[in-house]
Each structure stands twice: as C-alpha cells, then as structure tokens.
Image (cartoon, rainbow, N blue to C red):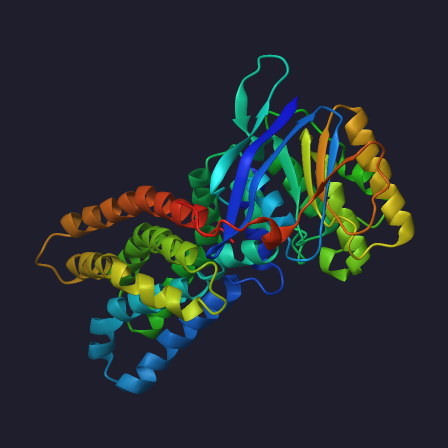
Amino acid sequence: MHLIAENLAARRGEDLIFVNVSFHLQAGEALILTGKNGSGKSTLLRVVAGLLRAEKGSVTVSDSVDGERRPAAEASHYLGHRNAMKTELTVAENLDFWRSFLGPGKAAGLSTEEAAEAVGLPGITHLPFGYLSAGQQRRFAFAKLLVAHRPVWILDEPTAALDASADKLFAGLIETHRREGGIVIAATHQPLGLENARELRMTGFAGVEQGVWE
Amino acid sequence: MTALFLRDIRLSIRAGGGALIGILFFLTIVAVIPFGVGPDLALLSRIGPAIVWIGALLAALLGLDRLFQAERDDGSLDLMLMQETPLVLTVLVKCAAHWTATSLPLVIASPLLGLFMNMNETAIGATMLTLLVGSPAITFIGAVGAAVAVALPRGGLLVSVLILPLTIPVLIFGVSATYAAVVGPSPFLPPFLILIALTLFFAVIGPAAAALALRNTAD
C-alpha cells in the first residue's frame, strides 16, 4: 500500500495556501504535519481526504498487489475537528451505524464493545453520545476508526480535548495500525510520540509568493 | 444503506427530531381554516382537499432544511462524501428516510383532518391517495434546496422559498386529481398519472442534483 501525493496546491478563497507539496508514504509510515495556526495543515488533510478540490496535483493510493491507483478518499478514515457522531443516539448506535455504513465489502473491524475497550471506555456504550464529556466524545470518535478497517488514517488534531493518558492510548493505537501496514497522516501541535514519523513543516503564506495561479 | 435509513428514522423520532413538528404544524394549519372561513359546511367541503394539500405541502417543507445541514454540522457529511458508495444513493436513502419519518405521518393524519373540513369518504380517500403518491416528489425537490443551502447558517427559509415554485406542479396535479375524483366531470386518471410521473421524474433528478450540489460545497 502506497499513498502518493504529487505537486499538491490548494486555494483558500483567492490565495494559494500551499504549492508543490509532494510526499510518498509506504505501508507502516506516518507523516506528521506541523506549523502554526493557519499554515494550511487542515487544508492539506482535507485535500488528501478528497473533501477539498486540489488546485493542482493529485493524491492516490496504490495497492502493492496489482498497482492500481485509486483516489485516496475511498481508502481513508478522516477524523476532523468535528466528531461525526450524533448526540441524540447512543454510542453503540453511532458506532454500529458507522461500521455498517463504512464496512460493506471491506475487511471487518472490531465489534463495538471491543472498540470501546480499545479507547479505554468499556461499559458506557449504552449512553447517549451527548451525555459524555468532550474528552470521552473524542475517544469514541477515535473508536470509529477501529470499527471499520481503512488502511489510511487522516487525523486532524486527534488529541484535542484529551488528557495525558488518552494521548498515550492514541499513540499506541496509531502504532498498532502502522504495524499492521497502515498509513497515518496527522496534523498536530503536541508531539504524538510516534516512532520514526516523518515530519512536514507547513509554512503557510510565506512560502507562496507567486500569487494567483494560471 | 439500511443502516443509514434506520439511523435517520431513529434520529427523527428522538428528541429534537422533526417528525412530530411537521404533524403539529399540519394540524394547526388545517384546524384554523374552519374558524377563518366560518361555519359554511358546503364551502368547507368544497375547499377541503385543497386546504389539506396546502397544509401537507407546507408541513413537508418545514423540516427539509435540516436534511443535510445536521450532517454537516457534526462532520458526518464529510465521511459520506468520502465513500466509494455513489453519493446519489446516499442522498436517495436519506430522502426515503426523511419521507418515511415526516411525510408518511402527514398522509396518515390527513383523513382525520379531512373530517375537520367536512369532506366525504371519496374526497378523503382521494386526498390520501394523491398525497401518498405526490409527497415523495416534494421531498426529492426539497433535497436539492437543502443541498444548495447546506453551507448557509440560516438557510431554513431560503430552502422553502427556493423550492416552493418547483413544488407548484405537484400541488396542481395533486389537487386536480382529487377534485376529479370527487366532483368530476374530468377523469381522475390523467392528472393522477402525471402526479406519479412527477414523483418518478424528481426521484431521478432530485438526488442527482443534490449530490452535485453537495460535492461542490467544499469548505
């Protein structure tokens, strides 16, 4: 499994926010995006996830078996700032929904209880998602990545609103995913404590002086 | 996809869901008409089918703006956009769930409201049948408006204003089919078949247009 980004450029409003971003990640590799606020970390992640159209360039994943290139979005989990869980439904209903919505035809993930245990919150999946604290909600949002298998994880500030033990727990889960051949791209301010992670420093507008693209 | 359907139904009947609001609104509109028109039973039964149809149309428009906005607010829409499953299919299933949760109860409640309007059995039956056949079209048209206005913070009224002109044909043929069944002399079948055609047409156009609009509201 390879994730290949070639000459990406993206625009926010009138301004190009980055140009010529390329990277090539192999199975088991992790890429950490750093940089100050507004430097384009989230924009790059949304471009990789296919949620924003790239001004130039492309992001594809290719299978090591047949080498066929597909859009990266289909092979990815995206964990953004928002948790993508319904506050009216219970945690179990939320996770069950995402498993069957994300799951069909793909390798199955963990069961709801197993996923809750993996994020350190077993036994409260019967509660409505809205009753939980911000940190617990974030943990269950992360559990969503475990209920259906996707080789690429795109994480935008995964550890916002989390305590130190959850930081460590997430780092462990990400390491496990990498050992199983997964690819991780994460934007973060705190060091996640990943081994051998490559780093991409986003510089924002300072690096883009060409102005408007033809 | 079944999971999405069940989830949306569940969401609409839980607290804050739109299912009950629509029925209450429908009830309110139709219930105040007799007070405004006065105790003229003949007049009431004559305008009854039209009033029930207008009430159902407005009630169906009521919750439509939240169809995609709620998904966008909590980030679920991002994940739906990323899937291999065609977005058109996702939109179609969401429309079906929305119709089952909000418009089907209106159809079921319409006979009761028909009694308020002094309508006879034929009129009640015809109204219910045309509503059943015509209301999916309103949902499919509404999905387009909801998708266009998904990024607007107060898009609710805008959605209704955008799609109301497009729902006028549905209203016209729905009401004229009902009247044809009740008073004649024009036959019932032609307007009724056009109503079915409208629903089928918008079942194809609506989800496709809504999916296109959702894809292009990148933010």
Count every numbered label the image shows and give the total: 0
Residue B183, position as x, y percentages in the image: 14, 63
Q: Is residue B34 left or right of residue B157?
A: left
Residue found at the far front of this picture: A209
Task: Measuring from the top left, give residue A111's x and y in whole percent.
Answer: 76, 34
Is residue B160 in sight in this rendering? Answer: yes
Q: Which residue extends farthest left?
A: B185
Q: Residue at x 81, y 42 (%)?
A: A116
Q: Say if A198 sits above or below B206 in the image.
A: above
Determine whether, in the image, residue B108 is placed left or right of residue A19: left
Across and down, in percent, residue A167 comes to 86, 47
Give me the residue at 90% from left, 52% from top. A164
| Residue at the image position 73 percent from the left and 28 percent from the top | A182
Task: State the image coordinates of residue A2 (x, y, percent, origin top left).
Answer: 64, 23
Depth check: A188 or B21 in front? A188
Q: Quadrant of residue B204?
A: top left
Residue B61 versus residue A78 in the image, above or below: below
Q: Is residue A121 visible?
A: no
The residue sitting at the right extreme is A165
Q: Residue at (78%, 30%) from the top-left corner?
A: A177
